[in-house]
Image (cartoon, grey):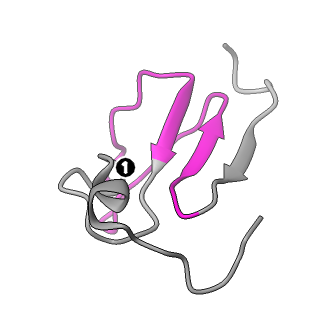
Amino acid sequence: MDREAKVSIQPTKNGPYIIRGNVQITDSEGNELDVQKAVIALCRCGNSSNKPFCDGTHARMGWQESASVT
């Protein structure tokens, strides 16, 4: 998928942001993270062991968003 392809970001209720498309993600120090998937999930609960990516912790702990983003 080339860089000109469409990217979409979809918040899920009480879950992660689902990102579809070719994206570049960098950490707070500017290092590019290795993203090899066309669909990724970014953590919103803050408790993932694999930040910034979602590892499903939100579901195990029953995390509820404080305000709807959908």
Residue 58 falls in image quadrant: bottom left
Q: Position of residue 4 (x, y in %)?
A: 80, 26
Q: How many marks?
A: 1
Front residue of 70/36: it is: 70
Residue at point 51% right, 55% down?
16
As drawn, is 2 to the left or to the right of 27?
Answer: right
Tell me the residue that label 1 is attached to: 54
Viewer-closest of 68 and 1: 68
At 50% from the left and 36% from the top, the residue drawn is 40
Based on the picture, tell me whether residue 22 belongs to the magenta stretch.
Answer: yes
> Where's the C terminus, which quadrant?
bottom right
Question: In the current view of this chain or complex, which residue is farthest to the bottom?
Answer: 66
Q: Is residue 42 left or right of residue 48?
A: right
In terms of secondary structure, where does tag 1 sit?
Answer: loop
Question: Which span of residues is magenta-colored?
Answer: 14-41
| Quarter of the image that includes the N terminus | top right
**Is 54 located above or below residue 2 in the figure?**
below
Query: Mainly helix, strand or loop, the magenta region?
Result: loop
In the image, residue 31 sits, relative to residue 61, either above or below, namely: above
Q: Position of residue 68 (x, y in %)?
A: 71, 76
- Residue placed furthest toward the top: 1
Q: Residues within 10 Å of mark 1 (few under 14, many from 20)?
A: many
12 displayed left or right of 70? left
Residue 34: percent from left, percent from top: 33, 33
Image point (34%, 68%), residue name: 28
